[in-house]
Image: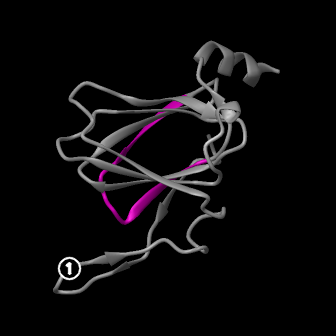
Amino acid sequence: MNRVQLIDIPKIEDRRGNLSFVEKDCIPFEIKRVYYLYDVPSGAYRGGHAHKEQQAFLIALSGSFDVVLKDGKSSQTIMLNKPDKGLLIPNGIWRELQNFSSGAVCLVLASDVFDEEDYIRNFKTFKSTKRT
């Protein structure tokens, strides 16, 4: 879990509104895919998987949600609710996103394109791979 990081995103404050940006120095990988989650119904969750190789950087662009992280031995929950904070999730960490507030938008910057072979979608399988 020590590889998981909450990272400050640069913010330029202005009386007309704030501006934040992510550049190559903000996160430790080249961005290969960008996607976002929104209109998540109350009580629903997203995620429920780990990646063998891919890394992800999550940002709450609007609203809030909890990210439950598990490494096979311990777990922690991090609430994302500020668009100038991002959560770096390295490979080999199980993640579940839950408790989405109304209007929440989760932006995900990924280190690779979609590849189903990179996903571990069964938690028992994930735990057994962490033991070996």
Question: What residue is rendered at 60% in x and 62% in y?
Answer: 31
Residue 5 lies, with reference to residue 116, above or below; the image says below
- Callout 1 crowding tier (Cα within 10 Å): few <14, some 14–19, many ≥20: few
Quadrant in the picture for residue 15: bottom left
Three-letter code, disc 1 = Gly
The figure's colour scheme reads one colour
Question: What residue is rendered at 75% in x and 21% in y?
Answer: 129
Verify whether residue 81 appears in magenta: yes
Residue 53 lies, with reference to residue 20, above or below; the image says above
Verify whether residue 62 appears in magenta: no
* Percent of width and height locating residue 96: 45, 31
Question: What residue is rendered at 37% in x and 66% in y?
Answer: 84
* Percent of width and height locating residue 83: 33, 62
* Percent of width and height locating residue 65: 31, 41
In screen coordinates, is 103 left or right of 23? left
Q: Main secondary structure of the magenta part?
A: strand
Quadrant in the picture for residue 121: top right
Count of numbered labels shown in the rendering: 1
Q: Which residues are magenta?
A: 75-89
Considering every residue shown, the one lying at the far bottom of the view is 15
Q: Quadrant of the C terminus?
A: top right
* Percent of width and height locating residue 38: 29, 44
In screen coordinates, is 83 left or right of 121? left
In screen coordinates, is 20 left or right of 69? left
Residue 96 lies, with reference to residue 19, above or below; the image says above
Residue 54 lies, with reference to residue 19, above or below; the image says above
Is disc 1 placed on a helix, strand or loop? loop
Considering every residue shown, the one lying at the far right of the view is 132
Q: Which residue is mark 1?
A: 17
Considering every residue shown, the one lying at the far top of the view is 124
Question: What residue is rendered at 65% in x and 51% in y?
Answer: 112
In screen coordinates, is 117 left or right of 84? right
